[in-house]
Image (tube, rainbow, N blue to C red):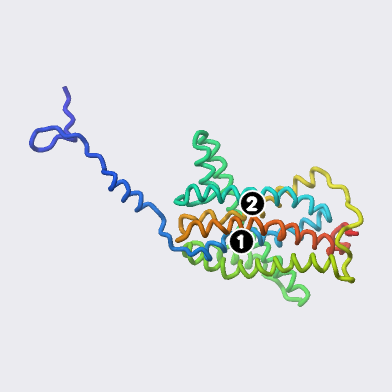
Amino acid sequence: MATDIRHQPENGYYSEPTQPSPTENLSRRSLMRLPRTLSPLETWGFGMTGLIAAVAIGPSMHVALGPNAFLVWLPTVLMGVMLNLQVKRLGEQWPEMSGGTPNYITRLLSNFPLLGRYAAIAYFLAWAVYPSVNAIILTELIKANLEPLAIACPETLLRIGFTLIAYIVAFSGSRALAILHAFFIIPAMGFLLVFSIQGMGWLAFSPDSPGLFPSSWPTLTFIDWAKWSFFAIYGPCACETASSFVADSRLPRETLRVLSLTAWLIPPVYLGSSWILMRLATSPETGRRLV
């Protein structure tokens, strides 16, 4: 009979392989955890990132659809609110899990691993294009402001530069990225909220406003609705970003509270800014006058 010498000690007696003790297992799991270095305020900056997308996609949608852009925002905003609240509950259930939504999906679909992997990869690919899209949007904004001054805009250089900046900051560490987000996103979010609230008030009460409601609605085809819903759904559903950093937060439950806050902010920011654009974007260049 063959002898297994892997567990045979020098004294000639056989020994069973030793199993790690519960204490050792706990120590090993602790070593695998992310260090909790982020404050709740730093993680809140991530949670508000998706709200700024209203400025990015809104004008283009209104140029193409006119007042019907509001009808595209309605279901996407509802889905964004529901997703935020659901992800918050999942974060409370698994506060040690990093990565947010794709990892929650994988855990929930553990009995269907192929479907879980597909959903997680799809989520990753959707986010992968975000830095380059932002670079294009920022370049176009700079170009639009330089054209009245007759200053040439180095478009290619700006697009490459803005894309590289995002990756340079990201690879500098989560905390550097968190501080940068908080520094820019939170004030921007405040201005956007003021724009929505003040704009709706001006439309409702100012004697110089064109009125709060349009007098007619053009026809919206299903193809137009489906095409622009594909772009619009990204913004409200991206507001759950803070859940990716629950495992990095010193106070996970405080970090998850931003998901409730953004769920309440999604309707006034997206629907409010869309309504203001609908009533004020009356240029013939939009293709449809809003009356």
* Residue 89: x %, y % from top left: 55, 48
Looking at marks 1 and 2 on the same chain, the residue that comes earlier in the sequence is marked by 1
Instruction: State the separation of the CA atoms marked 1 and 2.
Output: 11 Å
Q: Is residue 141 above or below residue 17?
A: below
Quarter of image, res 277? bottom right
Category of crowding for the residue at label 1, using alpha-carbon neighbours closer than 10 angstroms: few (below 14), some (14–19), many (at least 20): many
Whether residue 231 appears in this view of the structure is: no
Q: Where's the N terminus, which quadrant?
A: top left
Whether residue 280 appears in this view of the structure is: yes
* Residue 82: x %, y % from top left: 64, 48
Residue name at image x 35 percent, y 49 percent: 29
Category of crowding for the residue at label 2, using alpha-carbon neighbours closer than 10 angstroms: few (below 14), some (14–19), many (at least 20): many
Quarter of image, res 286? bottom right
Residue name at image x 83 percent, y 44 percent: 221
* Residue 16: x %, y % from top left: 19, 34
Residue name at image x 77 percent, y 55 percent: 61
Say which amino acid is labelled 2. Cys
Q: Nearer the viewer, residue 156 or 249?
A: 249
Answer left or right for 281 relative to 139: right
Q: Secondary structure at mark 1?
A: loop
- Tag on residue 48? 1
Q: Secondary structure at mark 2?
A: helix
Answer left or right for 243 relative to 35: right
Quarter of image, res 122? top right
Total residue callouts: 2
* Residue 214: x %, y % from top left: 88, 58
Q: Is residue 194 above or below residue 121?
A: below
Say which amino acid is labelled 1. Met
Q: Which residue, given by chain and number where applicable, does mark 2 sit on?
A: 237
Residue name at image x 55 percent, y 68 percent: 180
